[in-house]
Amino acid sequence: MSSSYRDFAGRGTARATVLRTVGPRERRSHLTAPRVPTVGIDIGGTKVMAGVVDADGTILETLRTETPDKSKSPKVVEDTIVELVLDLSDRHDVHAVGIGAAGWVDADRSKVLFAPHLAWRNEPLRDAISARLAVPVLVDNDANTAAWAEWRFGAGRGEDHLVMITLGTGIGGAILEDGQVKRGKYGVAGEFGHMQVVPGGHRCPCGNRGCWEQYSSGNALVREARELAAADSPVAYHLIERVGGNIHEITGPLITELARDGDAMCVELLQDIGQWLGVGIANLAAALDPSCFVIGGGVSAADDLLIGPARDAFRRHLTGRGYRPEARIAKAQLGPEAGMVGAADLARLVARRFRRANRRRVERHERYERYAQALRTATTPAPTPSSTDTPEQSTSVPSSSPSTPATPSTPATPSTPATLSTPRTNSAEGTDSAQGTSE
């Protein structure tokens, strides 16, 4: 029996054992997911944001750090994720981790096939992170996680067919139908930004020309403003003056700020971006026929300066206009935290209620330890006093009776993956791990 205990004692803490024995099975609906806190990670081109989110979508704590440089190895990004999660787990009971990555994620949501801003190429991110944290991990595209958050807690609540469009550096997208994210056969559905809207148009980093995101995104907005400033256009004098003649300091937030202050050129640029946005939405409506389009991402902060022209262009280009219902176009409500909140909520689908199971395992281990110690004590002969011992020395030897076992020493365990929140116990139980793991 003691050898059997040594076999499972080396497997790490009780929590790690409980989580590993559950396996990667995913629930089919958020309605059956446990109402437990989880961590969401949103990895973008410039920042990594991590937060603890409860079952109602409330953010309990948030941490931010810079995204490791693109040229660095995937291990550096993994280290960043693990450090953030462990930091949050010091103050919160973390049951699972969800990661929203700016890249293509495979259908199994285990590998990042390609990430334009990171050194991820067929990177097994889910397995790499779960091996180091010993909790369930879910990986998805960041637009999918943002769409899920808006459907659950934001502008898309109550919608059966929703399309999310994220306007940032480029254009991302996601499709939800009947409470399910539609990822496609290979997991890369929703890459709306690379639909061709102008054949032979502006060159896109993807290698093609005329992609939608070259006409309706943050990059498109800044490109048009810088071209006008570089040409020393009279309509750009205010913008040039604002940046002191340094054209490279022209940014999307600055253009939006000047547009709100009434700068005519900046207002016109946002209108152009909005009109192209409406054209693309009309194309998506013809193909997908959703009930609602949710517009998110950093560029959506322009509000009606952008979304108003988009609605007008959508109505003007919609196929069958006047004879069909029009989808609602709404601005996202959760802001830049949408991807993080959605990743955390999706992670609840693979989370497990392990606290009560963990307690039962600890209790069974303690009973076994008491029994094993009593057995060892009963089979160990009492020491015989030597002839030189004095009577006082002989009587000072403690008796070894099965009824009074000595306190067992803590067995040494090898190094194990980092575990979260639950205080570490002396060992973990594994022989009966299939029982009582999922509450």
Image: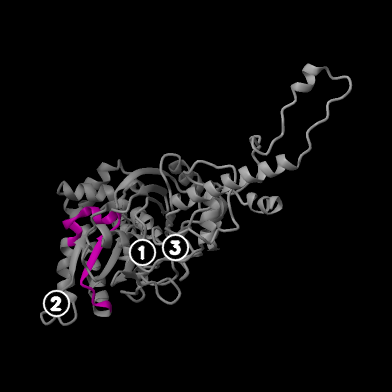
Q: Quadrant of residue 188?
A: bottom left
Checking the image for residue 103, the label placed there is: 3
Q: Position of residue 390 (x, y in %)?
A: 83, 17
- At a point 33% along the width and 70% down the height, the residue shown is 180
Q: Is residue 290 magenta?
A: yes
On screen, residue 420 versus residue 427, left or right, reads left
Checking the image for residue 144, the label placed there is: 1
Q: Position of residue 337 (x, y in %)?
A: 32, 51
Sort mark 3 into few (<14), some (14-19) or many (20+) by Cα contacts within 10 Å: many
Sort mark 1 into few (<14), some (14-19) or many (20+) by Cα contacts within 10 Å: many
Q: Quadrant of residue 4?
A: bottom right
What's the CA distance linking mark 3 and mark 1? 11 Å
Sort mark 2 into few (<14), some (14-19) or many (20+) by Cα contacts within 10 Å: few
Q: Position of residue 414 (x, y in %)?
A: 66, 46
Badge 2 element: loop
Q: Is residue 92 magenta?
A: no
- At a point 30% along the width and 57% down the height, the residue shown is 297
Checking the image for residue 325, the label placed there is: 2
Badge 3 element: loop
Any part of residue 218 in sight: yes
| Nearest to the observer: residue 183 or residue 399 | 399
Checking the image for residue 412, the label placed there is: none
| Residue range (magenta) | 288-307
Q: Earlier in the sequence, mark 1 or mark 2?
A: 1
Q: Earlier in the sequence, mark 3 or mark 1?
A: 3
Any part of residue 310 in sight: no
